Amino acid sequence: MTKQKAGIFDPWRQTHEPAITPQTVDKSDTTGNPDPAPVRFAGRRAGVIVWLPGGDPAQAQANVLFALESLMADKALYSFFTARGVLGGKEHVEGASLRTIMSDGSRTVVVLGDYQTAMDSIAFAFREVSRAKSQTVEYLTSLGIRPYIV
């Protein structure tokens, strides 16, 4: 059995580290925390920007995964995600050649397509969900998540 070398760093595929709990962004924070910095997950036509103090990519990924899982748990919103190819962690798609698996150790989400297509799908799903349920905008903003369309 041969030991495989580590490949190019991909923050979505790092499963060996413990899961990070989601961090909310408080605009009234006066404790001296650094100003929020953007972490961008870009697709071809859309993407997601996560604003967090310090701009930690692992924390940004954890916030996106937490938002996806909690919004997909709402049965009224689940169909918006599946229509875009965003699937829960336990679902497996037979015959799908391209899948992007996003995981932080405890949370896993499967998105059909390559990385850029996956980011497009997530951004469009967040936008559609925000239009369907007004509280979603406040929820995403509290996690520092802002989807954008190019």
Image (tube, rainbow, N blue to C red):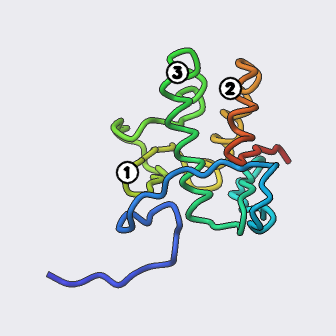
Work out which residue is located at the far right of the displayed protein and give it. Answer: 150
Query: Between residues 47 and 20, which one lies in front from this camera angle?
Result: 20
Q: Which residue is mark 3?
A: 74
Q: Disc 3 to disc 2, how far (Cα)? A: 11 Å
**Where on the picture, by quarter, is residue 93?**
top left
Q: Determine whether label 3 and label 2 are within 8 Å by CB.
A: no
Residue drawn at 35 percent across, 84 percent down: 5
Q: Secondary structure at mark 2?
A: helix
Q: Residue furthest left?
A: 1
First in residue order: circle 3 vs circle 2: 3
In the image, residue 33 sits, relative to residue 112, either above or below, namely below
Q: Say left or right for 139 vs 19.
A: right
Label whose residue precedes the other's in the sequence (1 or 2): 1
Towards the viewer: 108 or 51: 51
Horizontal side of 70 relative to 136 (left or right) equals left
Between discs 1 and 3, the one toward the N terminus: 3
Q: Is residue 129 left or right of residue 22?
A: right
Q: CA distance from mark 1 to mark 3?
A: 19 Å
Q: Looking at the image, which residue is at 54% across and 35% down? A: 85
The residue located at (77%, 22%) in the rendering is 131
Q: Hey, what amino acid is under mark 1?
A: Ser
Crowdedness near tag 1: few (<14), some (14–19) or many (≥20) residues, C-alpha within 10 Å: some
**Where residue 106 is drawn, which disc sits there?**
1
Q: Quadrant of residue 1?
A: bottom left
Please tell me the numbered disc located at residue 129.
2
Residue 98, how many percent across, how many down?
47, 51
Tell me residue 101's x, y (percent): 45, 52
The amino acid marked with disc number 2 is: Val
